[in-house]
């Protein structure tokens, strides 16, 4: 509701943080190892003050502690980045050796020769997501070797694209099918969740 014209609305009083809220926040920040850029809540002048009256039963204490425990839990950590030719954790040795030595044959191949980086990035994303949706386990992406010491742009950028969400969550491992052929990468995909 707007105030009538010509009248200035009264200033809203800012809510202040209680000592209990400030103490809970400081404990959370300390437990999480966070260094604030600028302190929002000034530290207390003395030791934290306890309420004068103790609660009559233990259930009154359980609620704040449960809330505190839920605040300390962090969001699920993303899986670690994959590197081409480096065995990832959690993959059995036989499956890794088969992928690394080219014995796991790709069920589909995407050739990126002649594409620009932005077009290639979109194509890789669609290709990998589509392959996983179809239930494919191994696919290949051909970037070409490129020129120069580090190869072409597509070859350099492909690991970054594959480690970005949402692709990283569905890829188990990356390997060149042959040590001499660094212009192609075989991807082992997670099984489609049903």
Image: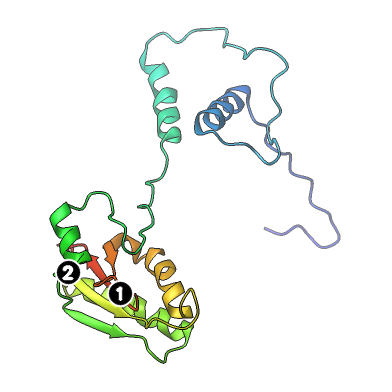
Q: Earlier in the sequence, mark 2 or mark 1?
A: 2
**Circle on res. 137:** 2
Using the image, determine if residue 75 lies above or below residue 65: below
Question: Which secondary structure lies at badge 2?
Answer: loop
Using the image, determine if residue 102 lies above or below residue 39: below
Q: Residues within 10 Å of mark 1 (few under 14, many from 20)?
A: few
Q: Residue at x 20, y 53 (%)?
A: 91
**Along the line of sight, which residue is nearer the eye, 163 or 100?**
100
How far across and how far down the image is residue 109, in percent?
24, 82
Quadrant assignment, res 105:
bottom left
Q: Looking at this rendering, what residue extends furthest in the right direction?
A: 6
Using the image, determine if residue 104 lies above or below residue 32: below
How far across and how far down the image is residue 90, in percent?
23, 49
Residue 165 visible: no
Q: Residues within 10 Å of mark 2 (few under 14, many from 20)?
A: many
Indicate left or right for 8 with 172 as reference: right
Q: Residue at x 41, y 70 (%)?
A: 161
Q: Quadrant of the N terminus?
A: bottom right
Question: Which secondary structure lies at badge 1?
Answer: loop
Quadrant assignment, res 74:
top left
Q: Which residue is mark 1?
A: 180
**Along the line of sight, which residue is nearer the eye, 8 or 91?**
91
How far across and how far down the image is residue 110, in percent?
28, 83
Q: Quadrant of the C terminus?
A: bottom left
Callout count: 2
Badge 2 vs badge 1, beta-carbon distance below 8 Å = no
């Amino acid at each position: 509701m707007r105030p009538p014209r010509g009248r200035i609305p009264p200033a809203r009083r800012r809510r202040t943080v209680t000592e209990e809220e400030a103490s809970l926040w400081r404990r959370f920040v300390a437990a999480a190892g966070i260094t604030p850029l600028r302190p929002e809540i000034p530290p207390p002048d003395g030791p934290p003050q306890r309420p004068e009256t103790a609660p009559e039963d233990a259930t009154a204490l359980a609620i704040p502690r449960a809330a505190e425990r839920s605040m300390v839990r962090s969001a699920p950590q993303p899986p670690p980045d994959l590197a081409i030719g480096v065995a990832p954790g959690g993959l059995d040795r036989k499956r890794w050796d088969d992928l690394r030595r080219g014995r796991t044959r790709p069920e589909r191949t995407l050739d990126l020769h002649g594409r620009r980086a932005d077009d290639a990035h979109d194509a890789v994303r669609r290709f990998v997501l589509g392959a996983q949706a179809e239930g494919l386990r191994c696919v290949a992406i051909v970037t070409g070797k490129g020129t120069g010491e580090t190869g072409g742009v597509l070859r350099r950028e492909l690991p970054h694209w594959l480690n970005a969400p949402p692709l990283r969550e569905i890829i188990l491992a990356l390997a060149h099918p042959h040590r001499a052929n660094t212009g192609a990468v075989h991807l082992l995909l997670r099984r489609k969740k049903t």
